[in-house]
Image (cartoon, rainbow, N blue to C red):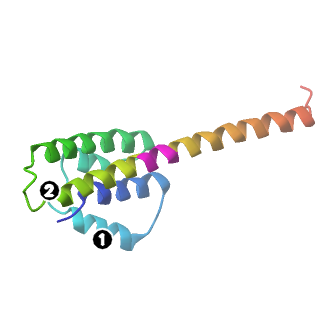
Amino acid sequence: MSCHEIEALRLGLMNVLGVGDDSAREHAEKELEGHLEGPIEGLANAESLAEVERHLDAALVDLEEEVAAMDGDDPEYDYTRGRLLAVRDAERAVQRLRTQGEDIVDGLGEAHDTLHETFPVED
């Protein structure tokens, strides 16, 4: 059993953030062999944070449907519910990443404005 959503998210975030950890990338790609389709493929190949969020949301919907369709006595039920919780937690982490990134952009804008207020430039 593997948590394809988490491995695909790792790959997508590595793409977006420019993380060049070849060992981690190879491990994730190996885990996903034969499972790169639909939202998992989109997530693994995401090149922007917006794409990561969109494909992660779709993967979550698929996983929620999988859990809902399972019998509570199924030996994989608890693991699959655990995957769902882990992916929901990952979704919150991605949302925090977006918020922090937006805060950085806003802060840079404020720093730029402050610099020009402190040292005005006449045209």
Task: Name the residue at 16% across, 47% down.
Answer: 67
- Foreground residue, 69 or 47? 69
Q: Indicate the position of residue 108 as horizontal and vertical percent values.
A: 71, 41
Q: Is residue 54 above or below residue 37?
A: above
- Foreground residue, 36 or 61? 61
In the image, which residues are magenta? 92-97
Left or right of 53 on screen, residue 59? left
93 drawn magenta = yes
Q: Which mark is residue 27?
A: 1
Hey, which quadrant is residue 69 in on the image? top left
Q: Indicate the position of residue 49 as horizontal and vertical percent values.
A: 44, 44
Task: Name the residue at 72% across, 36% down.
Answer: 109
Residue at mark 2: 77
State which mark lies toward you, 2 or 1: 2
Tell me, yes or no, whether the two marked residues, 2 and 1, touch with CB atoms within 8 Å. no
Q: Is residue 85 above or below residue 60?
A: below
- Foreground residue, 120 or 106? 106
SS for dot 1: helix
Q: Indicate the position of residue 62 as horizontal and vertical percent values.
A: 19, 43
Compare marks 2 and 1 and give the one earlier in the sequence: 1
SS for dot 2: helix
Q: Is residue 32 above or below residue 85?
A: below
Quarter placement of the N terminus: bottom left
Q: Residues within 10 Å of mark 2 (few under 14, many from 20)?
A: some
Left or right of 112 on screen, residue 37? left
The amino acid beneath tag 1 is His
The amino acid beneath tag 2 is Tyr
Quarter placement of the C terminus: top right
Whether residue 24 is visible, yes or no, is: yes
Task: Name the residue at 24% across, 50% down.
Answer: 40
Name the main secondary structure of what is drawn in magenta. helix
